[in-house]
Amino acid sequence: MTPNRLTASEAAAAIAAGTLSSEDLVRDCLRRIGERESEIRAWAFIDTAGAIAAARNADTAKLLGAGPFGPLHGMPIGVKDIINTADMPTQHNSVIYRGNQPGSDAAVVMLLRAAGAVVIGKTETIEFAAHGRLPVTRNPHDPSRTPGGSSSGSAAAVGDFMVPLTLGTQTGGSVIRPGAFCGVFGFKPTYGTVSAEGIKLFSLTLDTVGWYGRSVADIALVAGVLEISDEAAPPRHAMSELRIGICRTPYWQRAEPEMKAAIEAAAERLRGAGAKVEDAELDSEFDAINDLKETVMRAEGRFAFLNLQRAYPEKISPGITKRMTRIPNRDLLKALDKAAELRVRFDALAGRYDAILTPAANGPAPVGLAYAGDPIFNGMWTLLHVPCLTMPARVDAGAMPVGLQLVGPRFGDARLLGVAETIASAI
């Protein structure tokens, strides 16, 4: 196996053991990017010289024993291009920010670098991770299909073995849906557990930093670095101890046949492996939850982009302006209050289960690059501020990936990852 195909956790173990150098790993990732980038177009910026120099420094430090060494020592990563990096431009896929060079790293980038990560480059995104200019990225499994959005490049880069880890962000479904479409593991943690300092935000109530890897262990590796949980590591579970709730959500009729079949097949596999599986139904109070999310997102989007719309009216995309809906403050307040009530109600429901299993998207990635996919199975969980993990389901040979989603109550991140580790092989 070439180094670029290692999972992050496998690569970290090999670097720690001295059987793999950071430079060899980084160079192999850059080789893969060189071979595939013209087709996949996952990257907005690549710092080849800087990445190799950082990898050499990591190897030299290890050779000299000049530790301590973090869990991501020498690990190449990609960073979504709305997240500030001090040594690379952050351009938001916007003509307004073309060539923009921040003066410092975003907080999450600081944390990953402090753990030893080597930033290879910036990944493509929809304009401001909101709307407007589309990324040029294509799905690594079928270039005629969307990789999802807005974390398009981040999901595609991991899915195409260009890099083992990437950062994304989610306002509606911008981490989970691209992960599902590109066949990788994607995680949106509990809202507020990762600092958003140094990131251009669309919605203060919704925006959450997330990340991609190729295994649950990869996701847990980053979760540990970011200290999102009180627990040092995800707790282990036996399959026979697990109680899984199947939540079809109020929008089940929008799921495509492939997704419905994947949910039912996963439920049967889990039952066959010994887990207790039952329906977890949301009551009628949740029926209009996506409308609440849209109200909050559009109202706060207007606040977020008003300065750019006034200063650069000819440079901000019409799609962004269209999203800047003037919603009366009383309606926003009503939506925020209802969302707060539903968070408590969902936590109570989720507390009856070890995890909730639900669709990660409508189905496989749709054909075409002008549509990033429907976030209907994502936005409700973002509004509820709960942790969400997408994992690839088994699919027929040659078929496009279908992603399933695990969710849990707020601050149940470690438990959710522990459950995911147990059930991943069955799913």
Image (cartoon, grey):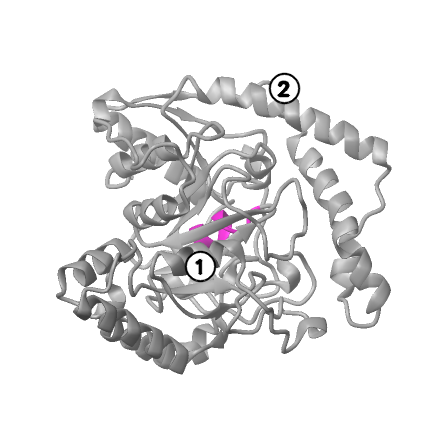
Where does residue 6 sit, x and y in percent of width and height? 24, 61
Where does residue 35 sit, x and y in percent of width and height? 35, 80
Q: Is residue 262 left or right of residue 190?
A: left
Q: Which residue is labeled 1 in the image? A: 155
Q: Is residue 184 left or right of residue 20?
A: right
Q: Nearer the viewer, residue 277 or 255?
A: 277
Q: Is residue 172 left or right of residue 395?
A: right
Snapshot quadrant of residue 14: bottom left
Magenta stretch containing residue 345, yes or no?
no
Q: Find numbered disc 2 in the image and state the secondary structure of the residue it sits on.
A: helix
Q: Residue at x 29, y 73 (%)?
A: 57
Where does residue 389 sit, x and y in percent of width and height? 42, 41
Q: Residues within 10 Å of mark 1 (few under 14, many from 20)?
A: many
Residue 337 visible within the image: yes
Q: Nearer the viewer, residue 342 or 47?
A: 47
Frontmost of labels 1 and 2 is 1
216, above or below 307, in the image = above
Q: Amino acid at mark 1?
A: Ala
Q: Residue at x 62, y 70 (%)?
A: 91
Q: Quadrant of the N terminus?
A: bottom left
The part of the chain drawn in magenta is: 173-181
Q: Which mark is residue 284?
A: 2
Q: Quadrant of the C terminus?
A: top left
225, above or below 343, in the image = below
Q: Residues within 10 Å of mark 2 (few under 14, many from 20)?
A: few
Asked if marks 1 and 2 touch (Cβ < 8 Å), the reply is no
Q: Amino acid at mark 2?
A: Ser
Q: Which mark is residue 379?
A: none
Q: Residue at x 37, y 75 (%)?
A: 51
Q: Residue at x 24, y 58 (%)?
A: 12
Q: Find numbered disc 1 in the image and state the secondary structure of the residue it sits on.
A: helix
